[in-house]
Structures are given as structure tokens and as C-alpha cells.
Image (tube, rainbow, N blue to C red):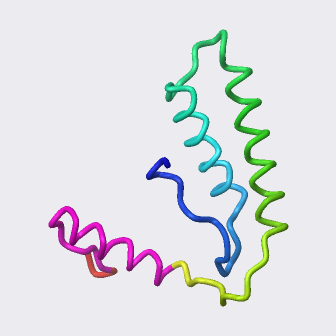
């Protein structure tokens, strides 16, 4: 799975259109092997992004869970702590 694609389900507030589109872009880039398509492939690339973003939005709207929604800030801090442990980098704080 692409490491840059973030989990979008069960957050409060829900995932934004921009977050969904960013995930779709990352997915299309990974599948196509290209970060920027040629002019000949640009229309197909953009259509795929739009189709995937629409599909992800439909999926997120249909998913159900009994778990309480996750807090974005708490999840961000957990991810930073994992990265610090993995890469040995200091955790960024609001004061930095």
C-alpha cells in the first residue's frame, strides 16, 4: 500500500474532498508508475483520479462502525511518535 495514502474512515470531522482527492492522486501515481503523466496520458490520468475519488467517497458514505470516531490531532501525534521511534527524529510540537 502507498505509505502516503492516509486512513480516511471514521474521523471526526469526516475526511474532506481534498483528502479524498489526494489519496486518489497517490493511488493513480502508484498504479501508473508516474507522478506526472505525459500530455498523451493526462486525460486518462485525470479521469482515473476523478473516478477513484468518487468511488472512495461512495465507500466512505456506506461504511459503518461501532467504534467511536478518531481524533485527528491524537492520530497525528501517534504517527509522529511512530516516525520518531522509527527514524530517530525529534517529535515536532506546537512550540517548534
Magenta region, main secondary structure? helix
Image spot of residue 2 (x, y percent): 48, 47
Q: Residue 86 versus residue 53: which sits nearer the camera?
A: 86
Residues shaded magenta? 73-93
User: Residue placed at 29% from the left, 76% from the top?
Assistant: 81
Residue placed furthest toward the top: 40
Image spot of residue 93 (x, y percent): 30, 79
Q: Residue 80 versus residue 33: which sits nearer the camera?
A: 33
Q: Quadrant of the C terminus?
A: bottom left
Residue placed furthest toward the left: 88
User: Residue placed at 53% from the left, 53% from the top?
Assistant: 5
User: Residue 48 lies in what quarter of the image?
Assistant: top right
User: Residue 18 lies in what quarter of the image?
Assistant: bottom right
> Residue 54 vs residue 81: left or right?
right
Image spot of residue 82 (x, y percent): 30, 72
- Assess whether residue 90 is covered by the magenta stretch: yes
User: Residue 80 lies in what quarter of the image?
Assistant: bottom left
Image spot of residue 57 (x, y percent): 79, 57
Relative to 39, residue 23 above or below: below
> Residue 64 vs residue 26: left or right?
right
User: Residue placed at 84% from the left, 67% from the top?
Assistant: 62
User: Residue placed at 50% from the left, 29% from the top?
Assistant: 35
Relative to 65, residue 31 above or below: above
- Assess whether residue 81 is covered by the magenta stretch: yes
Relative to 23, residue 59 above or below: below
Q: Residue 82 versus residue 16: which sits nearer the camera?
A: 82
> Residue 35 vs residue 44: left or right?
left
Amino acid at each position: 500500500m502507498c505509505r502516503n495514502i492516509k486512513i480516511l474512515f471514521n474521523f471526526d470531522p469526516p475526511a474532506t474532498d481534498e483528502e479524498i482527492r489526494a489519496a486518489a492522486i497517490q493511488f493513480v501515481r502508484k498504479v501508473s508508475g508516474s507522478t506526472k503523466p505525459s500530455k498523451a496520458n493526462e486525460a486518462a490520468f485525470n479521469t482515473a483520479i476523478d473516478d477513484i475519488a468518487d468511488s472512495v467517497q461512495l465507500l466512505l458514505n456506506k461504511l459503518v462502525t461501532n467504534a467511536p470516531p478518531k481524533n485527528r490531532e491524537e492520530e497525528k501525534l501517534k504517527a509522529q511518535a511512530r516516525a520518531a521511534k522509527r527514524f530517530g527524529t525529534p517529535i515536532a510540537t506546537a512550540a517548534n
